[in-house]
Amino acid sequence: MPLPAENQPISFEDINTELGNSTQATLDLKSASESFGESDAPYGMDELAGLSFNTFTYNMANVSGFTVADNGTVTAPTNTLGTITSLVYSSGYNSGTNKFPTVSTDTSRTVDVQVQAPATGYGNNNQIVSGSESATQQGIDTYSISTWVANGGAVSINRNSGSVSIDNNGDSTTTVTVTPTSFSTFTSPSSQQRNVSVGNITVPSSPTLYTNSDSVISGTITVTQLANELPTFTDDDWTGTITIGQDGSISATVGNVTSVNIDTSTFLEVTEDTPQTVQFDLIEIPSGYSNTGGNLNNQTKEVTQPAIDAFELSDWTGTISINGQDGTISATAGNVSSVNIDTGTFTTVDTVTSRTVQFDLVEIPAGFSNTGGNLDNQTQTISQPPLAPDLTITASPTTWASNETGIKTLTITNTGGDLETVAQFSLTGLGLFKLVGVDSNVPVINPYTNYYQATATDGSTSTFSVGVQPEGNNTNSSDNTATVSFLGSNDGGSQTLTFTPTQTYPVTWSATPSSFTGADRFDSTGETQYITLSTSESWTASVSGVGFSLDTTSGTAGTHTIGVTASVNTGDTRSGTVTLSATGQTDITISLSQLYAMQDLDVSWNNGFSYEEGGDTSTLTLSNNSSQYREYQIYARQDYDSTVTWEITTGTSNAVWNTGGGTTSTSDQTATVGTTPVSKIIRILANSSSSDAIAAIQVTSDRSIHTYYRTYTHEGIDDSGGSGPGDPGKGGGDQE
């Protein structure tokens, strides 16, 4: 059993008993302590409290191997007995990277370890024992601007331009930068110290690790700038050139000086390439040199003069051509005096055809070894172009109505040379029209929005067709149009035909009312009535007829109200016409009518001897006549022609109209009456009765407000007195 617990007395007998010794055996406390698993001093009785000979301790686990590398990487400890259940590292440890931070001085790192005892063989089976391990992390250097310089980084200043440059990037893993990038130059003193800021230095992590590896640093270094020292310009600094032509002429390009004077005269022509020495002067040396502005005189350079050549066909600058329209051959002389064509005219062709032309070049120009001679019987292969296209539109679409969307065919006919280069329709229609394939030789494509193209696969055919179709109904206020182009070309020429398909817009062109006549006619007193015009067109309006006018005479598309005014009418019926016009539309005509002016009607009851005016109501009493009728001629007149009506309103059995020719009538009598009086004869019949016979006569005009009314009273046979056979009161008399 374990030794007595802490603060309990422990005897050597207890220890011997626990160790399995004789109770009287001699003991060495150090050996006894180690037997109980205590390997560290002191070796006293108190340290043995509660221990058992087979108690598992931390030391028995044999924990080892804990290390920390310079870059902070941790190697975890291991053990040989029991199971490590927990590792707790000292401050600074990053479990994600398994590292401590780097340090600039040696630093002790620790780990607290917990070990679980084995499952059998100990008094504390499966119990946790604890301990700690330590290791030293070696310190490393911190990278600075001086480190960069020591590792090869270098900056210099150009003495002549003052520009700052990086001569060596050092061991930075990125390209460093400098500020400023230039200093002003100087000639005195001999040098100056300049402070240059160096930035964007990325600290390396290998082969040497630093505390700040992979970070970006900057710093200032001192750079010596030397005084400006200008070089002396020599002919080696000159960027120009000297050349000699085949004719011996010498020329120069100025390069970086102002001008070049050639001192050497022209050389004679040579028959083989020959080195020649040329003397020249370089005028006005450029800036940046100690001798700037001066000259370099009497410079020499060896230049090769090329040999003169014999004139060959390849040296000729003229041309041979064949006219595709008639096969004739022509030439430009170029650099010879003339060209003789030996080959005759060719026949015309429909496709490009290779022809061999023979010709003579007459009088070779100067500068060649055979100057003045001829080159005879030269040949060249020349392409004879075909006949040029001869295109016509032989079938074209007509105009589409606004609601018409069918396909119509456009056909091009070519009577010229084959269209070997291109035979192509194209349409740009702003989304209004499109091309449609109707010819298998002319497929249609739509390569991008609102653009159609149709290219013939065989340009040798004589006709090319494509369908043209509106994209939809035209609901716009103007015609929809597009441009269809056909390009036909070959080596003989090209020709373009264009066609403009048109889809008319929906036209609105109407007006109400259709007339101002009848019940709608204008009043004689004058008034304004209105026309409503609905139109999609610009329009004009005009009016004819006396007394009529318009309040507006033109306008644009829309709905418009046009006022038509009739002035006061003091005469007969007026008539006129309003005419509405728009380009491309049939005129709209609206008839106008104005009521006549009401006029005075004058009536004479007494055979025209005198006239009543302004209307009249009167009575005439006639004495009895039982066997004889009486007649009265009633006249009417007025300012202008209109219809006057004479009417028996009462007593048609007592009076009749004498209509002439021995006839009578009780019906109304009418006549057209103007300033010339017109009359009707009323016959008052005989009265054989004892009662009065009454007849009433009324005279009216359709254009007068005046009414004339007279009552004739023919007394009965029992009456006496009254008027005589005439009408003494009105001056009238009987007509029998």
Image (cartoon, rainbow, N blue to C red):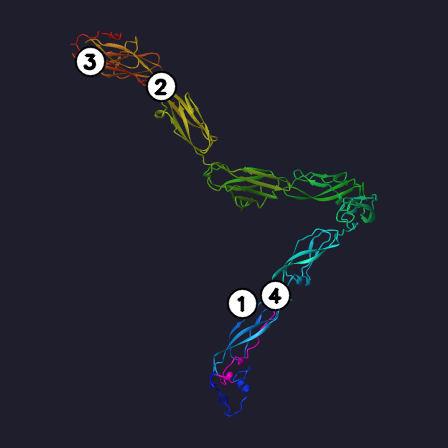
The disc, 4 or 2, on the residue closer to the chain's N-terminal end is 4
Which of label 2 and label 3 is nearer to you?
Answer: 2
**Which residue is rendered at x = 26% and y = 10% of the image?**
632
Image disc number at residue 693: 3
Image disc number at residue 592: none
Contact between marks 2 and 3 (CB within 8 A): the answer is no
The disc, 3 or 4, on the residue closer to the chain's N-terminal end is 4
Which of label 4 and label 2 is nearer to you?
Answer: 4
Q: Disc 4 residue type?
A: Thr
**Residue 635 lies in what quarter of the image?**
top left
**In this figure, which residue is indicated by the disc labeled 4?**
211
Mark-to-mark CA distance, 3 and 4 = 153 Å
Image vertical order of residue 280 relative to residue 107, above or below: above
Residue 556 placed where, x, y %?
46, 32
Image vertical order of residue 9 relative to residue 241, above or below: below
Q: Residues within 10 Å of mark 3 (few under 14, many from 20)?
A: many
Mark-to-mark CA distance, 2 and 3 = 39 Å
Numbered range of the magenta stretch: 45-70
Mark-to-mark CA distance, 1 and 3 = 145 Å
Image disc number at residue 96: 1
Residue 731 placed where, x, y %?
27, 7
**In this figure, which residue is indicated by the disc labeled 2?**
597
